[in-house]
């Protein structure tokens, strides 16, 4: 809440596998920020996939994001992402899964912000996950803890608490 006013976003998404190697994702959100995104992901080789994403963000305009992801080791993946607009940036990172745990680290360099991020995820059951994340950069620092519960095959419910320079934020 800011000044006695709450805020949030409503997000709606749809995913479809159009072939064994290609999928399409479409999402839209409204609330504090309005945006729409369409993404096409394709498996390029046995260990490499690529994605192209078109997005529209209100008050910012149209954007394009290109991403390559590759399996580096049996349980480790790396990626490189180039965001052409509306605010340009480049990101690289890696994720590693071991047992019921996963860690991820990212480095982003861009016109609006530069920073690093890291996260840890622990699967405590087939349907329940805990996560913690830290972000630090030119726009400040942020820490997040949360949990997600898989209700059924298509539905997950989650809750997070974020502490940052702007205050405390609750995410549902």
Image (tube, rainbow, N blue to C red):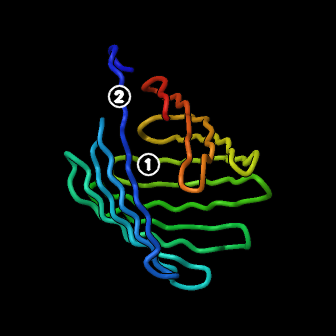
CA–CA distance in space, label 1 to label 2: 26 Å
Q: Earlier in the sequence, mark 1 or mark 2?
A: 2
> Can you give x and y, in whole percent of width and height, for residue 56 in the image?
25, 56
Q: Is residue 91 above or below residue 21?
A: above
Mark 2 burial class by Cα count in 10 Å: few <14, some 14-19, many 20+: few
Residue 10, above or below 61: above
Side of 155 where 123 appears, left or right: right
Q: Secondary structure at mark 2?
A: loop
Taking the spot 42% from the left edge, 26% from the top edge, the residue there is: 166
Indicate which disc residue 132 carries.
Answer: none
Single out the residue that lies furthest toward the bottom: 45
- Residue that label 2 marks: 7
In the rendering, at what x and y percent does residue 157 appear? 55, 41
Q: Residues within 10 Å of mark 1 (few under 14, many from 20)?
A: some
Quarter the N terminus occupies: top left
Residue reaching furthest to the right? 99
């Amino acid at each position: 809440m800011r000044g006695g006013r709450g805020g949030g976003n409503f997000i709606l998404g749809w995913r479809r596998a159009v072939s064994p190697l290609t999928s399409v994702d479409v999402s839209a959100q409204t609330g504090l920020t309005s945006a729409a995104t369409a993404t096409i992901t394709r498996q390029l080789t046995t260990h490499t996939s690529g994605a192209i994403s078109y997005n529209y963000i209100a008050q910012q305009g149209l954007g394009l994001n290109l991403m390559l992801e590759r399996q580096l080791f049996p349980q480790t993946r790396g990626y490189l992402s180039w965001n052409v607009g509306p605010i340009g940036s480049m990101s690289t990172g890696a994720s590693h899964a071991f047992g019921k745990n996963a860690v991820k680290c990212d480095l982003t360099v861009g016109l609006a912000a530069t920073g690093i991020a890291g996260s840890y995820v622990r699967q405590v059951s087939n349907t329940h996950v805990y996560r913690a994340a830290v972000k630090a950069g030119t726009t400040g620092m942020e820490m997040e803890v949360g949990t997600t519960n898989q209700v059924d095959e298509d539905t997950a419910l989650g809750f997070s608490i974020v502490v940052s320079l702007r205050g405390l934020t609750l995410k549902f």
